[in-house]
Amino acid sequence: MEAEWKGWEGGDGAPYDVAEPSHHMTAPADEAIPPAPVPGATACLPLLPAGRRGAAPGTAALSSCGDESTNFKMSGGPRISFNAIDSALSSLKNCQSYINSGMDVATQVALDLVESFNDEEDVNNMEKVMLEYATMDRELNHYIKAYEETINQVKREKPENLPDLENLAQEKFLEMESKNCDSDFQRNEKYMYFKDQLKEMKKQYHANDTIEQIDEDIAVTRSQMNFICPITQMTMKRPVRNKVCGHSYEEDAILEMIQTQKQKKKKVRCPKMGCSHVDVKGSDLVPDEALKRVIDSQNKQSWSTMDT
């Protein structure tokens, strides 16, 4: 059967090799990440061969299999291989890495804008870009899930004749899309990290500005307190933030503490004085990019003052 799955045609009539979907479903090798989309655009989303949205990518490959359902028996007939479809599915999953890379870049750009005191509208535009990426990620996840469930259903039920796989995948995809809501984005770790770091970045910079207008000495003292790791009692170089309680620590120090307590089969209490969180986990830690930028900026100012 695999020998007969030679290819299918795209929207412009050009043939694509189903066995090598990376030719048309992933970004070019010389393009490390996709360009950040303009809010409202969907160009970064892998489109269907026919160039239309709303149907799972790769369904053309499913359709080519379904068209020959009279020739292949699922029960008592020749064994059907789904290698080509599995390959297309793997290629779709690769697309997720490009979306994640785009979200990382958008996060860094937004933090740069805040650090450079750019117009608030520019920062808000980056949040719209992140929403576009999060939307694409959700849609791609639905594509993949519909794809997997369709194949698993066929393998599980083993019908006498191979059904119309394209329609089955389409139905599953549309059912998932019909349940979309804004709360879905709260499950997107990249988007939530963006929101968290943007908030922290604004708080660090805007709070310092307000304090400096009142008393410069107080501002310096408070900033230095925020820079000190509660474990090492030294200025942090690579701070990580606990998503549960919001406190930051030096990365190596907190990871070493977690590992040590794990060997003793004990939980780690947050080392920040007064914190009630008693179970710090490595999975709860994320790079505190906002705090690191403020610390680096403060260090540069200190070095500059010493040089003069």
Image (cartoon, grey):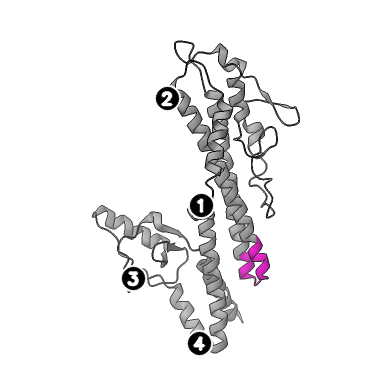
Q: Earlier in the sequence, mark 3 or mark 4?
A: 4
Q: Earlier in the sequence, mark 3 or mark 2?
A: 2
Q: Is residue 19 in view? A: no
- Is residue 17 shown above or below 288? above
Front residue of 105/244: it is: 244
Separation of residues labelled 3 and 2 (CA atoms): 51 Å
Q: Which residue is mark 1?
A: 184
Separation of residues labelled 4 and 1 (CA atoms): 44 Å
Q: Earlier in the sequence, mark 1 or mark 2?
A: 2
- How many numbered discs sit on the rendered protein? 4
Which amino acid does the dot numbered 4 rest on?
Asp
Q: Which mark is residue 217?
A: 4
Residue situated furthest right in the rendering: 12
Q: Callout 2: 10 Å neighbours few (<14), some, many (20+)?
A: few
Q: Earlier in the sequence, mark 4 or mark 1?
A: 1
Q: Earlier in the sequence, mark 4 or mark 2?
A: 2
Separation of residues labelled 3 and 4 (CA atoms): 27 Å
- Is residue 140 shown above or below 134? above
- Which callout, 3 or 4, points to the residue nearer the camera? 3
Q: Main secondary structure of the magenta part?
A: helix
Q: Please, what secondary structure does the residue beneath circle 3 have?
A: loop
Q: Which residues are magenta?
A: 112-125
